[in-house]
Image: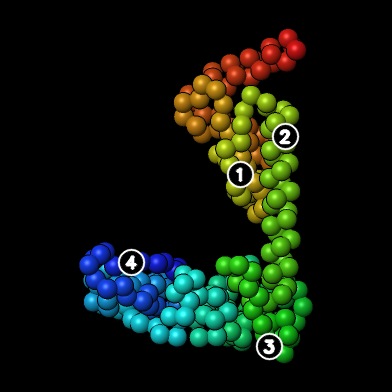
């Protein structure tokens, strides 16, 4: 679900209030649907977004904010995907039909609708969780990834000072198999002086370094230049 704000382009028209419209997803459900706040007439909205677009007067009051609070959308019958377990979340949390046999093992505890953890969704900014346990599990997951990311940055700075970290992601580089055994493995994309192909990586799991074949000479030159500079100082 996305939210956007649009304005009519005819400057000669009298100012119109911005109203709320919904552009349904292809499947007709709330997931992937878009909420649009616009001062354009309905016919223009349809021209831009298609015939399925419709008005939603109850959310006009959020036009100045440009966003509808997630809890309001849940109360209105919309549903979201849990940020952690990816199950469908409505105002009452996960429906009984969405429980699976492995749910206990994923988040712990009794996966039943009588358990209060599974009756109230938790909303943090734009992230929606089916229950408190999923929110706590996701917090722990993000903390672990944050720790690994910092370890990667520190290792590159210390062991490869001639290279810089462009970005860090979950997965594994090249032929590395670390991600197969650790679904939280992370790797960094590296950049360095003289590179041409930009496909060099460092893996947190095996501590391996992958350098594009066409960049090996530049890598070695950057490494040697850094080593010489360290010797001089």
Q: How many marks?
A: 4
Point out the tag, 3 or 2, that comes first from the N-terminus: 3
Q: Are marks 4 and 3 in contact (CB under 8 Å)?
A: no
Crowding at dot 4, Cα within 10 Å, few <14 / some 14-19 / many 20+, comes out as: few
Query: For residue 160, what is the image quadrant?
Result: top right
Q: Earlier in the sequence, mark 4 or mark 2?
A: 4
How far apart in space, not on screen, are marks 4 and 3 (Cα)?
45 Å
In the rendered view, how is the structure colored?
rainbow
183 left or right, relative to 80: right
Q: Which residue is mark 2?
A: 155
First-in-chain label (3 vs 1): 3
Identify the element where label 3 is drawn.
loop
> For mark 1, what is the residue?
168
* Residue positioned 51% across, 34% down in the render: 199
Mark 1 or 4: the one toward you: 4
Q: Secondary structure at mark 4?
A: loop
Camera-side residue: 209 or 197?
197
User: Mark 1: which secondary structure?
Assistant: strand
Task: Please name the residue that numbered disc 4 is placed on.
Answer: 7
């Amino acid at each position: 679900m996305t939210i956007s704000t649009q304005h009519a382009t005819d400057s000669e028209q009298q100012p119109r209030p911005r109203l709320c419209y919904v552009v349904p997803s292809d499947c007709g459900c709330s997931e992937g649907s878009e909420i649009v706040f616009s001062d354009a007439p309905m016919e223009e909205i349809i021209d831009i977004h298609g015939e399925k677009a419709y008005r939603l007067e109850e959310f006009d009051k959020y036009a100045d904010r440009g966003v509808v609070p997630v809890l309001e959308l849940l109360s209105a019958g919309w549903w979201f995907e849990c940020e952690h377990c990816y199950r469908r979340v409505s105002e009452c949390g996960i429906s009984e039909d969405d429980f699976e046999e492995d749910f206990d093992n994923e988040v712990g505890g009794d996966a039943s609708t009588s358990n209060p953890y599974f009756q109230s969704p938790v909303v943090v900014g734009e992230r929606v969780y089916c229950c408190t346990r999923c929110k706590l599990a996701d917090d722990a997951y993000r903390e672990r990834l944050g720790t690994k990311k910092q370890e990667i940055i520190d290792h590159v700075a210390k062991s490869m000072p001639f290279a810089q970290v462009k970005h860090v992601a979950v997965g594994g580089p090249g032929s590395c198999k670390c991600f197969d055994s650790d679904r939280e493995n992370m790797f960094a994309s590296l950049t360095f002086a003289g590179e041409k192909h930009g496909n060099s990586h460092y893996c947190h799991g095996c501590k391996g370094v992958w350098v594009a074949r066409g960049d090996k000479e530049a890598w070695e030159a950057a490494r040697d230049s850094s080593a010489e500079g360290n010797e001089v100082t």
